Image (cartoon, helix red, strand yellow):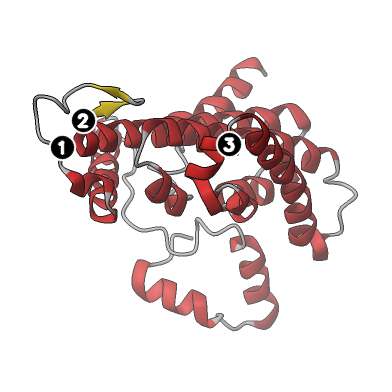
Amino acid sequence: MKSKNMSIFSNGIIKENPVLRLMLGTCPTLAVTTAAINGVGMGVAATIVLVCSNLVISLLRNFIPDKVRIPAFITVIAGFVSVVQMLVKAFTPSLDEALGVFLPLIVVNCIILARAEMFASKNPVLPSVLDGLGMGIGFTATLTLMGMIRELLGAGTLFGFTVTANTIDPMIIFLLPPGGFFVFGVLVAVSNAISKRQGKPVVEHLGCASCPMHSACKNAVLDSNEIPTDCQNAEKVGGNNE
């Protein structure tokens, strides 16, 4: 049991890293990582919401009707996001200003909704908490790493301290969207190379598999024997992994 729990915890950090392996949460990943401290703040906030929402949803999994589970999950997540947002506003207003709209948008973060739908709603409390903690740490580590790279190359600083700004001209492009996409692509490529060397499948395409609504969409297909338009488009672009 202990080894199984450790495996659940470590999956989110390395094997199923939500950003580099599952390709979830890319919007805040690209938007807030212009500085390392922003990545840490966003990651910690998302981790708190992940752990708390997984805990509550796991406790209520046998009481939430299947037909309203997604609205119920979003309500639980929104409650914890509101608490985290008020704490950030009260104690670190500069971080709240830096994260901007992406802090309240944690409510609809694909990582949190996906773990609620795919794991917490189907598993006991302890594994759900460990899953949320592992996914949160993996998310935080990726955001922090991206923030460090972009801040160092784009501003010559690291966590606000001058490192290379006085010796090498900063490359401002790394603080702009193209630089974010470039660093993200490099990290995904490195993650794929490491996975390939270890004999694990690399990220090529996910189709609908990474969508939190994947199971609901699948049920709809089974009920109507028709493929929804969104899934047809996704299948043409990325393929179907089922």
- Residue 92 percent coordinates (x, y): 58, 31
Of marks 1 and 2, which one's residue comes earlier in the chain?
2
Find disc 1 in the rendering and name its residue: 170
Q: Are marks 1 and 3 in contact (CB under 8 Å)?
A: no
| Of the pair 85 and 192, the residue shown nearer to us | 85
How far apart in space, not on screen, are marks 1 and 3 (Cα)? 27 Å
- Residue 214 percent coordinates (x, y): 59, 62
Q: Helix or strand or loop: what does disc 2 sit on?
A: loop
Horizontal side, residue 57 vs residue 90: left or right: right
Q: Residue at x 61, y 23 (%)?
A: 4
Q: Amino acid at mark 3?
A: Pro
Q: Residue at x 44, y 54 (%)?
A: 27
- Residue 121 percent coordinates (x, y): 74, 46
Find disc 3 in the rendering and name its residue: 93
Q: Are marks 1 and 2 in contact (CB under 8 Å)?
A: yes
- Residue 211 percent coordinates (x, y): 54, 59
Of marks 1 and 3, which one's residue comes earlier in the chain?
3
Of marks 3 and 2, which one's residue comes earlier in the chain?
3
Find disc 2 in the rendering and name its residue: 156
- The quadrant in which the N terminus is found is top right
Q: Amino acid at mark 1?
A: Pro
In the rendered view, tell whether residue 180 sits above or below residue 199.
below
Horizontal side, residue 43 vs residue 189: left or right: right
> Closer to the observer: label 1 or label 3?
3
In the rendered view, tell whether residue 96 sits above or below residue 173.
above
Q: Helix or strand or loop: what does disc 3 sit on?
A: helix
Q: Residue at x 70, y 77 (%)?
A: 223
